[in-house]
Amino acid sequence: MRQNTCDSLKERFVSIDFPFPCRQNRPLNSQNVADCLQKFNLKKTAVQKALDALVDSGKISFKEYGKQKIYLARQDQFKIPNSEELTQMKESNSTLQQNLHEQKKAISQVEEDIRTLQSNLTLEQMREKEARLRKEVKELEDKLEILREGVTLVKPEDRKAIEHIYSEKLSQWRRRKRMFKDLWDTITENSPKDLKEFKEELGIEYDEDVGVNLQSFTDMLPQTRKRPRGRL
């Protein structure tokens, strides 16, 4: 009965497609083999019995180091290549490596081509874009034709109203600048602090700090609405 159990374990053990670490021609202990066979639900006890059965059948051998057994395949069952065969194997490996490199390069090129094609517009998208651009060109051509004919695009009354609003906004800007200057001069008149540092501490920005100049906006007004330079 025990012999039949051992034979069954041995047959199952030999038929397993071992993971890569256990397929290497190197010494292994029973724990190493059990770790490789976890996904097959083989316990260490069953693995140990199978290893012992393989030893009894002469498939593998072992050496003892204290309480631990190290198992290794019998080397006389392997064909050891001679120097000529080793040379051929090296040449074959070199050829395969070169082919692999070329295949990877070809794959990279194909992937690059795919990315390029995916970034291009589809035929439908190109048609939509063409229609949109044609419409924009037509609108601009119509506008240009109107300008060439000397047609006034803005009515005089509309222009006058816009100039009035613009002039009023500039007047408010001047008044607020003057109000701030008066208030600032009063606050800082006897202040021992450095005015520049005090301004930065309060988060105050002058027009010139943000690249804005009141006079440049005033110059945009018609001459009849401009205020003399130097006046706020």
Image (cartoon, helix red, strand yellow):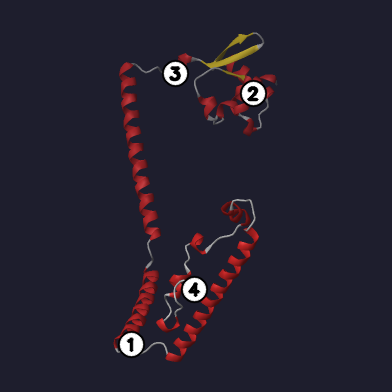
Residue density around tag 2, few if under 14, some if 14–19, many if 20 or more, within 10 Å = some
Q: Secondary structure at mark 4?
A: loop
Marks 4 and 2 sit apart, C-alpha to C-alpha, by 102 Å
| Sequence-first tag of 4 and 1 | 1
Residue density around tag 3, few if under 14, some if 14–19, many if 20 or more, within 10 Å = few
| Sequence-first tag of 4 and 2 | 2
- Which residue does the numbered mark 1 point to in the structure image? 146
Marks 2 and 3 sit apart, C-alpha to C-alpha, by 23 Å
Image location of residue 173, percent across then percent down: 54, 73
Tag 4 and tag 3, C-beta contact below 8 Å: no
Answer with left or right where residue 207 lies relative to residue 101.
right
Answer with left or right where residue 60 lies relative to residue 42.
left
Front residue (pair 105, 90):
105
Image location of residue 163, percent across then percent down: 47, 83
Marks 1 and 3 sit apart, C-alpha to C-alpha, by 95 Å
Q: Which mark is in front, 4 or 1?
A: 4
| Sequence-first tag of 2 and 3 | 2
What label does residue 231 carry, if any? 4
Q: Secondary structure at mark 2?
A: helix
- Identify the amino acid type marked 3: Phe
Q: Is residue 105 above or below residue 227?
A: above
- Identify the amino acid type marked 2: Val
What label does residue 78 carry, if any? 3
Q: Secondary structure at mark 3?
A: loop
What label does residue 47 carry, if any? 2
Which residue is depicted at the point 66% across and 32% down? Answer: 41
Q: Secondary structure at mark 1?
A: helix
- Identify the amino acid type marked 4: Arg
Marks 4 and 1 sit apart, C-alpha to C-alpha, by 41 Å
Front residue (pair 87, 143):
143
- Identify the amino acid type marked 1: Ile
